[in-house]
Image (tube, rainbow, N blue to C red):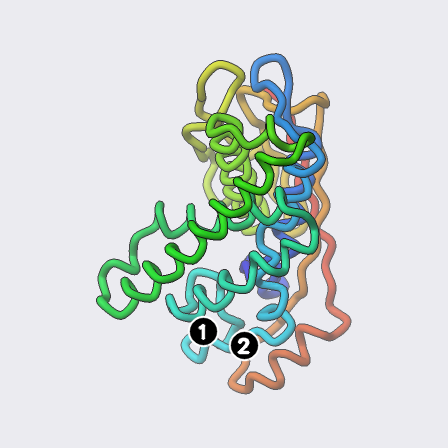
Amino acid sequence: MLHRFSKQGLICITQPNHAWLSGQLAQVWGNEYFGDFVPRKEVCLGAQQHDIGWILWEQAPTLNPQTGYPHNFTELSTQEHINIWSHARQLALVLGRYVALLVSLHGTGLYERFKNWENSPTSTQIVQDFLKREYLFQEQLIASLKKDAYYATHVTPEIITRNRKLIEIWDALSIIFCQGMTSQQQLIHHVPTLNGDTTLDLTLLSNHDHHQQIVISPWPFQQNEVTLVYEGQLLRHIFSSEIAMREALMGNYGVTLTTTLKPD
C-alpha cells in the first residue's frame, strides 16, 4: 500500500492499483529517442501486474500501531515481503510465461538493489533462499520460452535486461505519481533509450490534492500529453483497531486521482 497525504486525510493506494498506473505508462511509452520494446503486449501486461503478489495482502492490510494507518509497503518486515513475493510467480504464471518471468525478475531486482536485509543474519538467509528459488524459476521459464517459436527471439539477455529495466522505471515513476510529488524537481536516472540511457527530469507544474501536472524532459511518450488515472481510499483519521481500519478501507470514500504529464 502507498500513502498520499492530502488536506482531507490520508489517501491509501493499493499496490495492484499502483501497478495499473505502471501499465498505463507502458502502453504509451516509446518514440524515436527512447525506442520501442518487445514483446509489447506481454511487457505492458507484466508492468500492469508486476505487484500481483500483493493482491492477497491488500484484501486484509495490517495496521501500523505507531502511525494508526495501514502499513506502507516500506514498513513491512523482510519475512512479510518475502511471503508476498513468493506467491507472485504462481499468480502471474496464469497470465503467461513471459509475464511471470517479468514479475519474478522485478521481485528479485528489488532485493538485488535494496539491501537493507543484509543487516540481519535471519533476513539474509530468508532473502538468499528466496533468490535461489526465483533464479531457478527464471531459468526454467527462459529455457521453456527459448523452445517456443514465438518467444525465442524475445528472451535474449539484451531484450530481457531492457524489459526488466523499463518495468523498474515505470514502477519508480508510478510510485512518485501515486505518492504525489512533494518537491519541485525530481530525477530518474538510467532510463533506457534506443541507444543507451538518459536521466528523466520531472518538474512539478501544478499541485492539487487529487491532481498534479508534471513536466518531463526528455519526453519518453508516443503522445503529446499523457493523463494517468488511478484510485485511492481516503482515511480521515487514525486508527487503534485493525478491524475498524479495514472497514474504513472498504467504505464509501473512494478517490479518483489523476496525473497529467507534459513535455518541456
Q: Position of residue 121 (x, y in %)?
A: 22, 67
Q: Label 2: few (<14), some or many (≥20) within 10 Å? A: some
Task: Name the amino acid type tagged 1.
Answer: Thr
Q: Which mark identifies residue 238?
A: 2
Callout 2 secondary element: loop
126 or 13: which is nearer to us?
126
- Asked whether, in this view, residue 223 is left or right of residue 19, the answer is right
Q: Position of residue 32 (x, y in %)?
A: 62, 13
Q: Position of residue 249 (x, y in %)?
A: 66, 73
Cβ atoms under marks 2 and 1 closer than 8 Å: yes
Would residue 149 be visible to someone looking at this image? yes
Residue 234 sits in quarter: bottom right
**Residue at 58% over, 63% down:** 54
Q: Position of residue 138 (x, y in %)?
A: 49, 47
Callout 1 secondary element: loop
Which residue matches tag 1?
Answer: 67
200 or 15: which is nearer to us?
15
Alpha carbon separation for disc pair 2 and 1: 7 Å
Would residue 7 be visible to someone looking at this image? no
